[in-house]
Image (spheres, grey):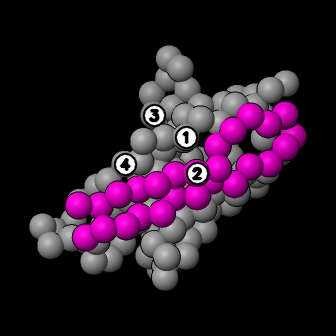
Amino acid sequence: QVQLVESGGGLVQAGGSLRLSCAASGSILSINVMAWYRQAPGNQRELVARIFGGGTTNYADSVKGRFSISQDNAKNTVYLQMNSLKPEDTAVYYCYVLGRTGLGNVVYWGLGTQVTVSS
């Protein structure tokens, strides 16, 4: 059993910043990838940023230069620092973990945290 606990969402004005956190706990042996996805009403869920175990990162074009993903391997925690937020960043943000368990590689999703950016 693996749990993902997300925190840090909320309401912020355009131009402001938020920091999301996601901590993985439970029967996970190692983590291959940690990522953040988001889904706005009427849209498909999309990748925002991801970080591999070795530290390589990828970002959606829409957030490059504004968002930064990082991880604390000792705490199995991933962070998303979001700066210069825009109204179009409004969405539910979901934590994603691809980890190795006793059953092999498994994908886990968090329940999501709402980010609302007002204009």
Residue wearing tag 2 = 7
Horizontal and vertical percent for residue 76? 45, 72
Give the residues drawn in magenta, as a range: 1-27
Q: Main secondary structure of the magenta part?
A: strand
- Can residue 44 be seen? yes
Mark 1: secondary structure: strand
Proximity of marks 1 and 2: CB atoms separated by less than 8 Å: yes
Kind of residue at badge 1 = Thr
Frontmost of labels 3 and 1 is 1
Frontmost of labels 3 and 4 is 4
Frontmost of labels 3 and 2 is 2
Residue wearing tag 3 = 45
Left or right of 61: which side holds 71?
left
Cα separation, mark 1 vs mark 4, equals 12 Å
Mark 2: secondary structure: strand
Residue sticking out furthest to the top:
42
Left or right of 18: which side holds 84?
right
Cα separation, mark 4 vs mark 2, equals 14 Å
Residue wearing tag 1 = 113
Left or right of 60: which side holds 107?
left
Residue wearing tag 4 = 109
Cα separation, mark 1 vs mark 2, equals 7 Å
Crowding at label 3, few (<14), some or many (≥20) Cα neighbours within 10 Å? some
First of labels 1, 2 by sequence position: 2
Mark 4: secondary structure: strand
